[in-house]
Amino acid sequence: MIAGLDEAGKGPVLGPMCVAGIIIDEKKVDALSTIGVKDSKQLSAKRREALDIEIKKLADKFFLLEVTPFQIDDLRKIMTMNQIMVACFVKVLEELRPEHAFVDAADVIEERFGENIKKKYTGKIEITSRHNADQLFPIVSAASIIAKVHRDHLIKELERSVGIEIGSGYPSDPKTIRFLENWIKERGSFPDFARCSWETSKKLINKFKIHQKSLSEY
């Protein structure tokens, strides 16, 4: 049995990060390509939604890990983002227990990322860790689709809960920055689904003179 792992939402200033993993019999891997699985960024939202259903039917098991903005901020006090990614991937692998896992490397040195996962994992496992693994291996592409679809649903839920468009959550999204600036102007604090440890947030702290102490409330 082999597994594929990928994340969605590592970089956004708003919303959770989702790490997905699927495990599948090697004999069924070709079926992923047959149904049109590829890097989630190359697919429309509608196509991802359809493939998400098909992938879950093919998978022997899948697991989704949600990491909240508060958890990310808290972990960043004691860990680097790369270490957080290793811990998250290990958590997913512990649930799937594959013989061989293909992972999208979150470290500039792809082999090191795989070795760090192996060190933390409690069992015996072979790891193939590559940059852009979601473009190289259909099983990682499948995981990237599941992660992306799940995070998109969570972002839509956040929008419904606040009743305001928040954009994609990424710092490069003008809608997201506009939402954050307006929220801070009106309330003098960040929403509880913002990552306060992000550089974008720190710039807004300085811009709007938010007292650092208020971040601990979220």
Image: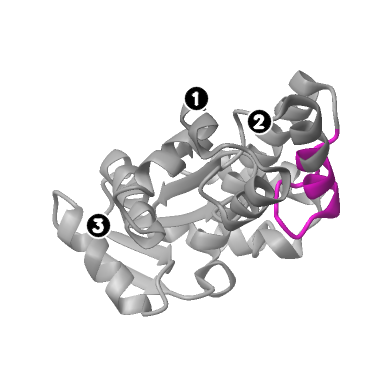
N-term-proximal mark, 3 vs 2: 3
In magenta segment, residue 169: yes
Residue under label 3: 99
Question: Which residue is at a point 83% across and 36% down the rendered structure image?
Answer: 182
Residue 95, located in which quarter of the rendered image? top left
Question: Mark on residue 189?
Answer: 2
Residue under label 1: 217
Task: From the image, state whether disc 1 or disc 3 is nearer to you.
Answer: 1
Mark 1 in CB contact with mark 2 (< 8 angstroms): yes
Please report the bounds of the magenta region as a residue range.
Answer: 165-180
Front position in the image: 81 or 216: 216
Question: Which residue is at a point 39% across and 39% down the rendered structure image?
Answer: 74
Q: Residues within 10 Å of mark 2 (few under 14, many from 20)?
A: many
Q: Amino acid at mark 1?
A: Glu
Q: Residues within 10 Å of mark 1 (few under 14, many from 20)?
A: few
- Residue 94: image x %, image y %? 26, 43
Question: Which residue is at a point 72% across and 50% down the rendered structure image?
Answer: 207
Secondary structure type for disc 1: helix
Secondary structure type for disc 2: loop
Q: Residues within 10 Å of mark 3 (few under 14, many from 20)?
A: some
N-term-proximal mark, 1 vs 3: 3
- Residue 13: image x %, image y %? 63, 48
Q: Is residue 160 above or below residue 79?
A: above
- Residue 71: image x %, image y %? 42, 36
Gap in angstroms between the C-alphas marked 1 and 3: 42 Å
